[in-house]
Amino acid sequence: MLPAVEVVDVARTFGSVVALAGVDLRVEQGEFFGLLGPNGAGKTTLISIIAGLTRATRGAVRVLGHDVVTDFRAARRSLGVVPQELVFDPFFTVRETLEFQAGYFGLARPTAWIDEILHHLDLTSKADANMRALSGGMKRRVLVGQALVHKPPVIVLDEPTAGVDVELRQSLWQFIRKLNRDGHTIILTTHYLEEAEALCHRIAMLKAGKVVRLDSTANLLARVGGIACRVSVERLPSAWRARGQRDEHGAYRIGLESYGELETLLAALREDGITVRDLAIEAADLEQVFLELTGSGRRAT
């Protein structure tokens, strides 16, 4: 079976800036695949190359076996992309926007499917509203609808829930899960790591234009053990510095193999005279893996 998306040694430079430095990926048909990394890791550049919006400096990308450069028409038909930016035509209603998008792919007003999209994205009541009158969250829903209107076998979601409310986020993921169960391949980038942890079968983590780890979600979580400690201190003992990652609040997050290791950490803090301002124990999650693999003190964005 052909892979849904195959990325072979893809590099992209913008002058002296290296956005991608040789990326290799293979996403199988029917997968729910996560693409994570900090700002500047190259995620959006890679998606732009897959979508045919940017040319790679080196390498090749194929969507269901169709090269995105030499067989671009078939590649585009196989792909639906929800972009990160809010891009819309202010002169049309929601329904007209979806109908025009369908027309770009040669579909003559697939009314029943558009009605289903509007229903699942909670846009039925806004079907005849002008795009200019919608809130930012509503506009993002329409972008999702545009990506789905030609029923592409491969769907790329570039931070689809940014700026949307919790209720929509839940209904959107129910719909996307259904599409995945029906056989659609989903590629997701998100700064909500708990979403990637709950949804993705496999995850690739990018840093500085390279894949630093590609594995199943279960294997990535196993990497950090069963618990994690978040401790607010001025510094860590020297023996623990390599294991701690500082978050946006200034606290250190450390993966622990057992509660016995927690006592070892506390003893080291006492020995060095370091005052603990706050301490919390939580289940290890994808955020800890992200911090360890990317060396980032911030969440994926």
Image (cartoon, rainbow, N blue to C red):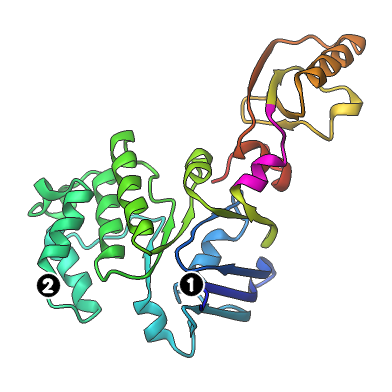
Residue under the image location 76 percent in, 19 percent down: 259
* Res 60 quadrant in image: bottom right
State left or right for residue 152 relative to residue 277. left
* Amino acid type indicated by mark 2: Arg
Secondary structure beneath dot 1 equals loop
State left or right for residue 128 relative to residue 51. left
The vertical placement of 291 against 61, above or below, is above
* Amino acid type indicated by mark 1: Ala
Residue under the image location 89 percent in, 16 percent down: 268
Give coordinates of residue 289: x percent, y percent.
67, 41
Residue under the image location 27 percent in, 51 percent down: 141
The vertical placement of 218 against 225, above or below, is below
Label 2 sits on residue: 109
Secondary structure beneath dot 2 equals loop
Pointer 1: residues within 10 angstroms few (<14), some, or many (20+)?
Answer: many
Label 1 sits on residue: 4
Magenta stretch: residue 93 in it? no
Magenta stretch: residue 226 in it? yes
Q: What is the span of residues highlighted in magenta in the rendered image? A: 218-227
Q: Residue furthest bottom?
A: 70
Give coordinates of residue 230: x percent, y percent.
68, 22
Residue 91 visible? The answer is no
**CA–CA distance in space, label 1 to label 2:** 27 Å
Give coordinates of residue 83: x percent, y percent.
39, 60
